[in-house]
Image (cartoon, rainbow, N blue to C red):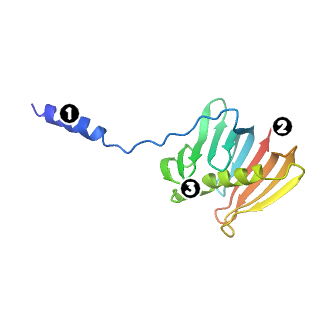
Amino acid sequence: MRTIPLLLLIVVFSGCQAPQQTFHTPDARWHTETGQLQYSNPKRSIIGETVVTALDHQEFQLDFMAGPGFPIMKLRRSSDMAHAESALAHVSWNGKTEHPPGKLKPWLALADVFWRLSDSNASQIQVILQSSQAGFWKATANLKLGRPADVTIEFPQSQERFIFHLNQ
């Protein structure tokens, strides 16, 4: 008899979960870059395969994998909402991009870098960018036919570095 009220409570409260943010699936309109990413911080350096997709200044997705199918970071950003799953940072997070856990701030900032790179002039060979927040990040990108080929993004405060070598 005691299990029936307990089961009812579980059913009632399971319907009270916060709704999960839905992120768009990339299609032909999205810019997709594939290649390799080297992520480093003072404690470690990891190299793996990456897929970066972006649409305008609203949608961004990054998948970073080591070896066949071992996900290191899966990041989804749509406007001011984001979802991240990371074996590296030991975190699974959903929320507003303005209030991420500290370990995810550099990862979420990658969207800003790639969005700004998409605004670059196709005739440029090298682009140097800085975050609007003084000293948060700086980026250098070599472009080929207006697309990023080699991108280095440094975060001086956390001593994190992302080096992308993207296929053309």
**Is 103 rendered above or below residue 66?**
below
* Residue on which disc 2 sits: 168
Q: Residues within 10 Å of mark 1 (few under 14, many from 20)?
A: few
Query: In which quadrant of the rendered view does residue 34 lie?
Result: top right
Q: Position of residue 96 (x, y in %)?
A: 50, 54
- State whether residue 49 appears in this view: no
Q: Is label 2 in contact with label 3 (beta carbons under 8 Å)?
A: no
Q: Position of residue 66 (x, y in %)?
A: 66, 36
Observer-side mark, 3 or 1, equals 1
* Residue on which disc 1 sits: 7
Observer-side mark, 2 or 3, equals 2
Specify the farthest residue to the left: 1
Q: CA distance from mark 3 to mark 1?
A: 38 Å
Q: Residues within 10 Å of mark 3 (few under 14, many from 20)?
A: few
Q: Earlier in the sequence, mark 3 or mark 1?
A: 1
In the image, what residue type sits under mark 3? Answer: Lys
* Residue on which disc 3 sits: 103
Residue at 80% across / 46% down in the picture?
A: 148
Q: CA distance from mark 2 to mark 3?
A: 30 Å
Quadrant (top left/top right/bottom left/bottom right) for the N terminus: top left
Task: From the viewer's perspective, tell me whether residue 102 is left or right of residue 32.
Answer: left
In the image, what residue type sits under mark 1? Answer: Leu
Q: CA distance from mark 1 to mark 2?
A: 56 Å
The kind of secondary structure element at disc 2 is loop
Q: Position of residue 150 (x, y in %)?
A: 81, 47
In the image, what residue type sits under mark 2? Answer: Gln
Task: From the viewer's perspective, tell me whether residue 155 is left or right of residue 24.
Answer: right
Q: Work out whether residue 144 or residue 80 is closer to the camera in this orientation and state it.
A: 80
